[in-house]
Amino acid sequence: MYRTHTCNDLRLSDVGKTVTLAGWVAASRDLGGLTFIDLRDRYGITQLVFDMDDDPELCSRARRLGREYVVQATGIVRERINKNPSRDTGDIEIQVTDFSVLSPAKTPPFTIVDDTDGGDELRMKYRYLDLRRPCIQRNLLFRSRLSLEVRKYLAEQGFAEIETPFLIKSTPEGARDFVVPSRMNRGQFYALPQSPQTFKQILMVAGFDRYFQIVRCFRDEDLRADRQPEFTQIDCEMAFVHQEDILQTFEGLVRHLFHVMLDIDLGPFPRMSYDEAMRRYGSDKPDLRFGMEFCDLTAHARGKGFSVFDQAESVLAICAPGCASYSRKQIDELTEWVRRPQIGAKGLVYVRYEADESVKSSVDKFYSPADLKGWLQVCRAHPGDLLLILAGETEKTRKQLSELRLEMGSRLGLRPPHQFKPLWVLDFPLLEWDEEAGRFFAVHHPFTSPKAADIPKMDSVDPAVLKSIRADAYDLVINGVEIGGGSIRIHDRELQSRNFQLLGLTREEAEAQFGFLLSAFEFGAPPHGGIAFGFDRLCAVMNGANSIRDFIAFPKNNQGRDVMIDAPDFLKPQQLEELGIATVDKQG
Ligand code: ASP
């Protein structure tokens, strides 16, 4: 037996027992006659002690143990004199009678502690060492437990977990595909799935009724902190359901997960239409941990000779509570902040509602104190508050102000990471116009059903009418992060064809790409719908973390590289030859 206990098992009640532990040397301290070693494994840390007086030979061997050596030690559990209350095993230590080195270790390039000195790249290169850090271990163990809970809950609700293939052909869902050349079919390529969307719909046609899968998806997109080229979804689909059934079922799942994992009751999730979310927060994924809702000053701000506001489609404000005391410098800094290319606002107008109820603004030249008081009233401002105002084209201004709102929320400490505010956003538009491509794209995906009442609008040729079509599509948002999204699907061949047409696909193209789905719809397709949750994101949000990387065992870096295994990499000319792909010049 390698070990009788883990490094987190032993307590005062074990004093006197002879035990054997195995683990990594986390730290060692040499105090003259005594040598202490912290032995770490996945479960915790136990202190080993070697006494020069008891066994000088053993003690001097122990002094030579380096960090991260793998050691097996046998000894007697005894009560510690200096207890360590921050450690589960902090009341005891092991008086070692014998030990052996199972594996030596080079000095690690960074310290293996939560608060490590290792930079990102270094930690990614030595990911196996990074993964030894207790905080990352906690994250991955959380993830493991979370996936078990998802499976348990959905299985109890009658869902069957069914795997779908990774080698498929392109499903257009807004991102680029990763492709895999086929050796046996020279010149042809598989695509890795961006999601199992069409397969899960086919499973509904096949009669499986309630499907789920915790599944890897692949999207060749530019990377950000919350994006990875491969990521995991909890992918779900149900037949014979309305939108309401789906919302109820998966609200149940998410509430259950928060309850069992975090002991938090989220309560019933509020709901908001897409239009309302855009109007009140300028975002389809508003963070509801704080207020600072948008106030529309357009009508109030026009006609006083301030051309910026006169010409603007929208003049929108947020009211930052208690910020009237912001200095000129602070406001200038905020102005610079909204002017950065990432935000792209032209300028920022402010109105200070001083504690003595006087009003000061950057547009005093154009507006009387009474005008400004009117604005303050619209915004329900209190003395001491600061209005921050952006103006311009509605869509852009909303986006910019939404960023500013989040920034102010963060600066004011109104976004505590361990407080959770869920929200269903409903009634997304079916289509969005892409200026560059000069055509409509599906907001969710091409299989999403328009609302029954809006189906007649699909025959219109007026872009404004088409834009106004609502879909039975919904997102689950928590703390401003899109955790999941889905829709009721089209299950009628003709309607699906019409939708493809609106998306600019000819009959032939639709047939070539999705013939299998269209023809499945001719053999008795049940009404169906579903949702997919971003599993990595859910892990991160539940832990109050921003980056999904810390919840993925082997993530890619910002360039999409795995720096540990050094992928992607060039292929040998023979391999390329075999695959029927022209040799790529390494220089080129
Ligand atoms: N396949 C969709 C996605 O990946 C989710 C869904 O509609 O169920 O976003």
Image (spheres, helix red, strand yellow):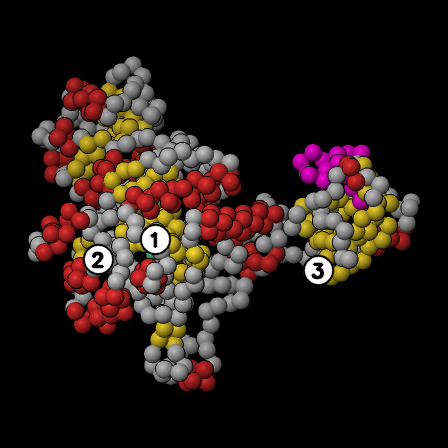
> Above or below — where is 283 with respect to 209?
above
The secondary structure that dominates the magenta segment is: loop
Report whether residue 443 is seen: yes
SS at mark 2 in the image: strand
Q: Which mark is residue 105?
A: 3
Q: Disc 3 vs disc 1: Cβ atoms closer than 8 Å?
A: no
Res 527 → quadrant: bottom left
Q: Residue at x 25, y 62 (%)?
A: 524
> Above or below — where is 213 with respect to 476?
below
**Label located before the other in sequence (2 or 1):** 1
* Magenta run includes residue 90: yes
Q: Which mark is residue 251?
A: none
SS at mark 3 in the image: loop
Residue 469 position within the rendered picture, expressed as x and y whole percent measured from the top left: 16, 49
Tell whether 45 sits left or right of 143: right
Work out whether residue 152 or residue 558 is closer to the camera in this orientation and state it: 152
Q: Residue at x 27, y 69 (%)?
A: 516
**Label located before the other in sequence (2 or 3):** 3
The residue to which callout 1 is attached is: 238
**Label located before the other in sequence (3 or 1):** 3
Q: Residue at x 34, y 39 (%)?
A: 423
**Hey, what amino acid is under mark 2?**
Phe
> Which quadrant is the N terminus positioned in?
bottom right
SS at mark 1 in the image: strand
